[in-house]
Image: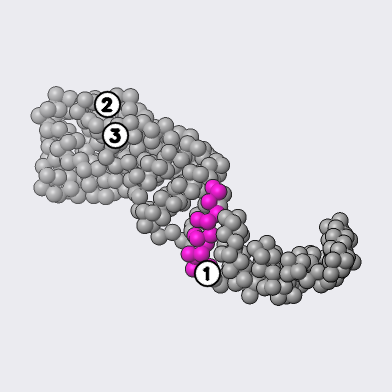
Amino acid sequence: MMKRLITLSCLLVSVSSIGQELSQYTAVRVQKAHELAQDDKVKQAIASLKEIETNRKYDSAFVARMLGVFYWQEGQIKPAINQLKIAVSSGLLQDEQAWVTERMLADLYLNDQQFKSALGHYYALLKSVPKTQKADDLWLRIAQSHYQIEQWSKVIPATNSYLKTKPKERLQPLSLKLGSQLQLEQWKQAIPTLEQLIVLQPEKLNWWRQLVGLQLRVGNSKAALDTLSLAKLNGLELSQKDLHLLAQLYAKRGIPERAAVQIGQLDNATTDVKLLSEQASYWQVAKEWDKAISVWKLAAQMNAKYHWNVAQLMVQQGYYKESLRVLDKVKGKEADVALAKTRAFYKLNQLEQALIEAKKANSAEPSSQAESWITYLTQLRQAQAVTG
C-alpha cells in the first residue's frame, strides 16, 4: 500500500557510530551486512545477519532492526514485521532512528491489514516526535486504520487533526471523514464535508448527488435546488432522474413554469403519459392555461382519463364549443360532466340544452349546485318567454 521511501542509510547507522554499544563480534558482521546491502546484495546481507549468534540483548535488537529493513527491501512483509517487532518491543534502540523504526513497523502493519496493531504504534509515535521527523501524516494513517475496522467515531477526529496540518492532499481524508459521517448518520455535519469535496473535484457528479440527497434529508429543499441547478449550469451530465428531481424542486420552490420547462426537456417528455400529466399540472399551477391545455391533450391521447382535465380548462378559459366535444369523450363522472356541459351551453346561450344537462346532473347525483342551475335556468327561460 505505501512502501516508504526510506534509504538504508536512514535506518542503518555506521558501525563506528554504534561501536561502543555493539559487541565487536556483532559490529563486524553488521558492517559486512551493511556493505552487502549497499552493493544490492540484500539476500546475502540477510543470510549474513541470520548467522550472527549473540546473547547480548542490544545486539539482538539491532540485528533484528537491520533484518526487518532488509526483509522489507525484499518485499517480505511478514518476516519484516516479525523482526521489527522484536527490535521495537525490546525498548533498547534509543538512537535517533528508533522512532523511524517504529514508524516503519506501524506502516507495515497497516500494509498487512493488521489495523489494530498499527494503531497502537501510531498513537505511541505521536507521543514523542523527533524534531528531525515529520509526523503530520500519522493522523491520516490513524484515520485509515480506524476506518478499516469501522470505528467511525474515531475516524472523524483523526481526519480533523490531519486536516489542521493543511496538507496538499485533502481528497482522501475528506473522503474518509464523509464515509464515517454517513455511517454515523451525521447528515448536517456531512454537508460541509461534501462541499469541500466538490471544491476539490467539481467534475465528480456523485459528490453533487450526495449533497443534494443530504440537503433534502435535512429538509433544505432550497439548498438542494441551488446545488442541482448549479451542477447543471457547470455542465455536468445529469441523468434523467437528476433532471426530473430538478423539475420537482423548482415546483416545490414555487417556480412551476421552470418545473414545466424542465419536464419538457426530458427524453420521454412527449411519450411518457406520467411526465405529460406532471408537466401539464405545472403549467396549470403557473396559470399558463393554454400551455396546460395543449399538454393535457397529448396526455389524453394516451390515457382517456385526461380528457376531463382538458375539458375543465377549456370551459374555464371560454372554449365552450370545443369543450363540449371533449366532454363527450369523458368516461364516468356523469354528474360532473353534465354540470360542465350546463355551464358551456349556458355560455353559448343554449338555455334549453343547459337545463337538460342540469337536470341530468341532478338525476345522476343530486346536489345544491345542480338544483341552483335548474332554478336559475328555469327562471331565465320563463323571463325570456315573457319578454319574447
Where is mark 2, residue-wise?
A: 129
Q: Nearer the viewer, mark 2 or mark 1?
A: 1
First reached walking from the N terminus: tag 3 or tag 1? 3
First reached walking from the N terminus: tag 2 or tag 3? 2
Q: Which amino acid type corresponds to the residue marked 2 in the rendered image? A: Val
Q: Which image quadrant is residue 365 in?
A: bottom right
Whether residue 162 sits left or right of residue 363 in the image: it is left
Q: Secondary structure at mark 3?
A: loop
Crowding near the residue tagged with mark 1, few <14, some 14–19, many ≥20 C-alpha atoms within 10 Å: some
Whether residue 76 sits left or right of residue 48 in the image: it is right
Relative to 45, residue 303 above or below: below
Where is mark 1, residue-wise?
A: 268
Q: Position of residue 162 (x, y in %)?
A: 34, 34
Where is mark 3, residue-wise?
A: 166
Front-most of residues 147 and 197: 197
Indicate the quadrant containing the C terminus: top left, top right, bottom left or bottom right: bottom right
Crowding near the residue tagged with mark 2, few <14, some 14–19, many ≥20 C-alpha atoms within 10 Å: few
Q: Residue at x 41, y 52 (%)?
A: 231
Q: Position of residue 386 (x, y in %)?
A: 88, 66
Q: Which amino acid type corresponds to the residue marked 3 in the rendered image? A: Lys
Q: Is residue 107 visible?
A: yes
Q: Residue at x 60, y 61 (%)?
A: 289
